[in-house]
Amino acid sequence: MKTEPARGFASAEFSARAKLMQKEMARAGWDAVLFTTAADIFYFTGFLTDFFASPTRPWFVVLPARGMPVAVVPEMGKTAMAKRYVGEIRCWNSPRPEDEGVSLLAETLCGFSPQNGAVGMTLGAGTIVRMPQNDIAKLRGLLRPRTIADCSDAVLRARMRKSSAEIQKMRHIAKTTSAAFAGLPEDARGEMRERDITRRFARSLLLRGADSLAYLAAASGADGCESIIMPPGEKRLSEGDMLMIDAGAVFDGYYCDFCRNYRAGDSAKKTINARKAHGVLHYALREGFAAARPGAAAEDLWRAMESAITRKGYGASGAGVRFGHGVGLQLTEPPSLMRGDETVLKPGTVLALEPSLVMESGRAMVREENIAITKTGVEWLSDPAPEEMVSLFLR
C-alpha cells in the first residue's frame, strides 16, 4: 500500500495563509475577518473535527489585521484548539442558547476594530455563515456602528490556489478513489442492486485509506440517467443497463470528486448507444485537459469540451450547464467551468472536468475527472477511466 501524505501542515504554511489574507484585508480596509465554517476554520488554523455535523454549538475564528488567528470556541474545544495555529483562545460554556458565544465574539471583534471600522464575513455566493440568523442579527447590533463587509471573494481566491502539500493530499485521495473504482467489478461481483454495489465500493474505498465518503450519488438505467445527484436506491440492474457512481471522498479534510460509468453484464450490443456517448465524453475530457494551462480562463475549458460534444452531434445536458468546478476543502468550489466565468487559472488550482450530454433517449450521461493546474501545464489527479465502459458482472 502506498504511503499516505503527512497529515496537517507546518506552521509556516498557516502563517503564509494568514499573511496573504491580511494583505487582502489591508487593501479592502477590513480590520478583522470572521470565519464560521469547518472549511475556513480548518484552512486558517488546522482545526479539523467532525463535530461540525452537530448544529448545537457554533465555532468562531477571528483573523485580525496583524498576528495569528484568535479562536472563540465552546469550552469543550479549548484543548484541541490549543494544538492548532491560533494565538489566543477565548471560550464560553456551551450550550447556552440565550448567548451562544455572541457577546464574547462581539467583544473580540470590537477589540480589533475601531468604531468606524469594518469586519469581513463570507456573505457571497458559494459561502455560508454557520450561526443562527437570530445570532447574526444580534452580532450586527453589538458591532454597530462598525460595518460588516462581504469578504467571500478574497477567501475563495486564497483557497483556490493550493500549495504543493494540499495537492499532495488531493492527489492521494484521487488515486485512492481511482483504485476503488477500478476494483469495483471484482469487489461487487454478483451484486445486482445499486445500493449493494455502492456499499461494496464504499467499503473498498475506506479499506484503501479514505477518511470518509462524504458524497455518493448513483443512477442506473438503459441509455443514460434521469438524475445524477440522487443517492443509490433499491433498483436492480438488468443486462444492458448502465450504472453511474459519483464519489466525493476525503483525506485529511480534502476532497476528490469524480464519477465512473459501468455497463451491466457482458452484452456490448445492448449498450451500444451508451457506449458511443461514453466515447464522446472521453473525447471531450481530453479536449478539456488539453485546454487547461496556467493563464487560461475557466470558460476556455468549457468551450473546448462543449465544442467537442457538439462536433460529435450531441447537445450538452441542460441549458447554461457547467462542465466542472473547483475542488478542495469542499466538494465544489470556484471557479465554474461555464460560459462567462473568466477566472484565470493559476498554478495550484484543482478542478473537476465534468462534461455531460443528452443521449437520443433524452437521458443524460456525464463523465468526470480531477486535474491540477501546474507551473508548466496540467496534471491528472484521478486516473482517467478508459474510453470503453467497464463491465460489471451480474448474477
Image (cartoon, grey):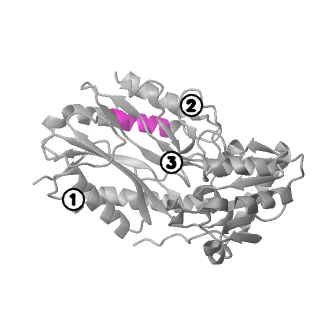
CA gap between label 3 and label 1 equals: 27 Å
Residue 43: x %, y % from top left: 64, 59
Residue found at the very far left of the displayed protein: 395
For image coordinates 19% across by 52% down, the residue present is: 193
Query: Which kind of residue does numbered mark 2 sit on?
Result: Glu
Reading the chain from its start, which is encountered first: label 2 or label 3? 2
Q: Secondary structure at mark 2?
A: helix
Query: Which kind of residue does numbered mark 3 sit on?
Result: Ile
Left or right: residue 335 versus residue 282 is right
Residue found at the very far bottom of the displayed protein: 79
The front one of 164 and 92 is 92
**Residue 128: numbered disc:** none
Left or right: residue 327 versus residue 385 is right
Reading the chain from its start, which is encountered first: label 1 or label 2? 1
Label 1 crowd (10 A; few <14 / some 14-19 / many >=20)? some
Reading the chain from its start, which is encountered first: label 3 or label 1? 1
Place residue 225 in its image quadrant: top left
**Marks 3,1: beta carbons within 8 A:** no
Q: Quadrant of the C terminus?
A: bottom left
**Residue 188: numbered disc:** 1
Residue picked out by circle 3: 371
For image coordinates 14% across by 58% down, the residue present is: 190
Image depth: mark 3 or mark 1 in front: 1
Label 2 crowd (10 A; few <14 / some 14-19 / many >=20)? many
Query: Which kind of residue does numbered mark 1 sit on?
Result: Ala
Magenta stretch: dominant SS? helix
Left or right: residue 167 versus residue 113 is left
Per the rendered image, the range of residues in magenta is 280-289
CA gap between label 2 and label 3 equals: 16 Å
Residue picked out by circle 2: 299
